[in-house]
Image (cartoon, rainbow, N blue to C red):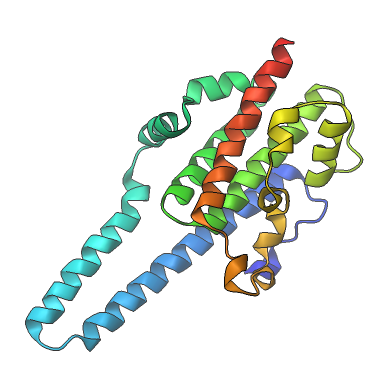
Amino acid sequence: MISEIKLKRQNPSQVTKELTELALKQFESQVNNFRNRVTKQIKEVGGKAGAERQVETGQKAERSIFMMQVRSSKENWEAIQNEYGISKKDFGKKINFVSDKFKRGIIFRDTEHAFVLASQGFSKTALILAGGVIEELLRQYLEHKKVKPGDNTFFAYIEACKGNRLLKRGVFRLSDSIRDFRNYVHLAREKKKSDTILKTTAKGAVSSIFTIANDFQKETSN
């Protein structure tokens, strides 16, 4: 699966699409693994009553996993507003320099998905999606400002912002994990337990989307 993702010098929209597909595949894999664990535990429990209790426990836990699928987009954005203090409408205003309707839709979608995944503990996929959103926002903003980066990479976009004194608060607060989010696509990156993405890191990546969005609005109003 990982070998199918070729990230170098691709169109950012294509990269976002591929990262989204990867996130969904990884989510499906995690759900299947969960089901397998529950099935194994049921088989190991002796007696009918014990098996029935185990099935009930497994069903409750599985329902909790699939809550993220049944919640509406409106409910997800209400949860975003409660946690980060920004509505979908306000977020849209802050990124008004993204004029393409389709690309705006992708940004809204991936921001929402990153939030849901981070909230449910799918930290790695949430980080990858959030990083993709930030990268595309920076690319669009530099294009809007008619600033040409050294090349079409996330690091080049960050350096272009620094060199032109843009988005200082948001860009400088990006963690190393977010800056290096592309490398987390590769399983070889996780050599030990400490390399695993924490839930707090994933939620921080989602928060960075809105921090930078606030800077967009400040820069535009100046």
Q: Taking 152 as reference, is 28 left or right?
A: left
Instruction: Work out whether residue 59 or residue 156 is closer to the camera in this orientation and state it.
Output: 156
Image height of 139 relative to 62, above or below:
above
Residue at horizontal 47 percent and vertical 60 percent from the top: 27
| Residue 202 place in picture, x, y as percent | 55, 50
Location of the N terminus by quadrant is: bottom right
| Residue 7 place in picture, x, y as percent | 75, 56
Image height of 47 relative to 67, above or below:
below
Q: Taking 35 as reference, is 144 left or right?
A: right
Q: Is residue 6 visible?
A: yes
Instruction: Work out whether residue 220 or residue 27 is closer to the camera in this orientation and state it.
Output: 220
Instruction: Work out whether residue 159 or residue 173 is closer to the camera in this orientation and state it.
Output: 173
Q: Taking 12 as reference, is 50 left or right?
A: left
Q: Residue furthest right?
A: 150
Location of the C terminus by quadrant is: top right
Q: Is residue 153 visible?
A: no
Residue 61's quadrant in the figure? bottom left
